[in-house]
Image: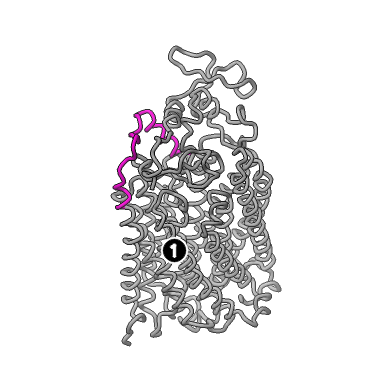
Amino acid sequence: MQDVRAYVGPPGGRGVVEDARVLSGYTISATIWLLFSTAVGLLVSFKYSYPDLLTSPLLSFGRLRAIHTTGTFFGWASIALVGCAMYVAARSGGVTIRRPKLAWLALWSFNAAALIGILALDLGMSNGSQEYREWIWPATLLFLFAVVVSGWVVVDTVAARVGHDIYIANWYTIGGFIFTTILGIVAILPFYQRGVGQVAVQAFYMHNAVGMWFTFLALGATYYALPKLLNRPIYSYALGVLGFWTNLVFYPVIGAHHYEFSPLPWWFQTLAIVFSVGMLVPVWAGSGNFALTLRGRWSSVRRSYALPFLVVGIAYYFLGSTQGTIEAFRSLQAIWHLTNFTVGHSHATMYGFITFIAWGAIYALVPRATEKEPPRLWVGVHFWLAFVGVTVYVAVLSVAGTEQGLTWANGDPFIASVEAAAPYWLARAVSGTMMFLSHCVFAYNVYAMTIAPHRVAAPGAAGAPA
Amino acid sequence: MTRRGMNDVRVLVVAAAVIYGLLAIAMGVIPGRVLSATPPGPGVVPLSEAAARGRDVYVGEGCSYCHTQQVRPLAQDHVWGRPSARGDYAYSTPQLLGSERTGPDLTTIGARQPSAVWHLIHLYQPRSLIHASIMPAYPWLFTAKDRADTGDTVVAVPGGYAPAGKVIVASQSALDLVAYLQSLKQSPIGAQAMR
């Protein structure tokens, strides 16, 4: 709480209170989407083991599958990280959030977009089962509007900063808003998306939606929260800048590695594989930079409740992204492509990396904004349930995918791949249950940090954040 | 205070937008445009009206989350047909190549399993035909009646998998979906034309 006073005068000033309300509003909205979307994911995971569980059109696998992915991407992770980006823009610049009315407009638009897109999906209205752009176009357009409006708030807030330099965290978040605006326009225009042409656009879109939006927002949040919690500067500003530019230039080329052995031109796929190797530069620059910032401060990690989330997020950023490079090689895609291995990879990155960073940032920023601490015991329960849950999840699906791919390569009848994966699917449902329970605990912690009438934590348990 | 170079937020915004905009055109728009102009392969024809409606059902129910429609030039994919060619997809928008093969590839399902009777029973309850299948059942594409009317397509669901004393009748959506599945075949082409 010291930092808030240092920058913007006495606590309780109007702007500071409004900033806390904006951050709380985004965090609460995101948490509701997390609970909803992962409850859906949990039901879907049990349908693998019990396919006749809750057979009805509104609860069918094919419709809920897209609701789980788009709900977690655009409801949970987007709203959570956009809220953090606005708050980081203000705090790092020593000002309050500019145009808070637009911040609220963007939040309502994000929520309305998610509601429309998900309701339509449940009624069987899909934009063609295209991964991460299943929402009907009015919902997509509304989401894009929210990205532009919230990006405007962040840019305006950064422009109003007190100091000279734009802090590296804001490079990343501003980049994320700009790239996603362009990406959204490219994805929604239909003129160049027929047949296999749409496959090419989909390859570009689906990977960029992950790497030019969530990665940039999450790295931005980490570049602010990590040094703040450790109370020491980031190890290298230059590594951060290197990561920014190399991610920007390499990432847009790698999408076609999701369509290896497809009818897309062979050289186009090869180009994507080559640049996937290039991605090691920004990934290792970023994760190495964070690791060197953490060096020698493990005692701080043990004492903090927010830092462990960031440490896991950074570790999964390194592991999941490096795994992405390795699995792009043709020799490995021949076995792993189209199997559950990919689902394990996407949870290592979107959950182990993005979601853990979002949690770390929320636990770092929200108590400072609202001056309300979450109960430490429950933060610990949240951490361990989620960490063990996702690690088991990724492990069992990686094995399941390998088994599926090997039965195919072996020339077994197709049903053998279903029977080989079945025990791992049950294990996935169990680990998914742990993850979902952790979200319930997280929701309680968010309540304690935001709308709870008073400090929920016992006086003895509440220490200073960090 | 004057802020120069990348510390001017306008420069950061414009630089990021220009660089990414060019990359988006190079890696998204141009490949999309060039490949969208792919002519239909030999023997590739548009879907019938019923099959086109059935394709919409396929999309709305999210079938492609578990069923791919792409045969790879790999030995393990020979069972599904010849490797897919770009011209095979000339009439396939939205594209349904898929990213996961939890169930079998459907590129040639119309040739591998041409029977409408089989498809209707399978859609009503997959486990009545394949015990280990985890495919969802789609009973809402059917109605359970006391007796069939003239013109009804009655589905002979194996005993124990349908309500006792009822007849199961396929809806128009189920018939359309089966028409689409039956239309999924590959036209034979020479190896020269494939890439």
User: Is residue A279 placed above or below B67 in the rendered structure?
Assistant: below
The N terminus of chain A appears in which quarter of the rendering? bottom right
Q: Is residue A162 above or below residue A42?
A: below
Q: Is residue A243 above or below residue B164?
A: below
Residue A253, quarter of picture? bottom left
Q: Where does the C terminus of chain A fall, quadrant-wise?
A: bottom right
Q: In front here: B139 or A187?
A: A187
| Residue A450 in view in this figure | no
Q: Horizontal placement of A328 versus A150: left or right?
A: right
- Mark 1 lies on a secondary structure that is helix
Q: Residue at x 36, y 69 (%)?
A: A99
Instruction: Please give the range of residues in magenta.
Output: B33-61
The residue wearing badge 1 is A213
- What x and y, as percent, mark residue A453? 58, 64
Query: Percent position (x, y) of residue A232?
Result: 56, 84
For the residue marked with disc 1, what is the amino acid? Trp
Residue at far bottom of view = B1
Horizontal relation, residue A429 to residue B106: left or right: right
Eyeballing the image, is A175 above or below A207?
below
Label 1 packing within 10 angstroms: few (<14), some (14-19), many (20+):
many
Q: How many marks?
A: 1
x and y percentages locating residue A398 in the rendered image? 62, 54
Q: Nearer the viewer, residue A465 or A396?
A: A396
Residue A125 visible in the displayed image: yes
| Chain letter for the residue marked with disc 1 in the picture | A
Residue B24 picture location, percent across and down = 34, 62
Is the image coloured rainbow, by chain, by secondary structure, or in one colour? one colour
Q: Is residue A295 magenta?
A: no
| Rendered image quadrant of residue A414 | top right
Q: Nearer the viewer, residue A321 or A19?
A: A321
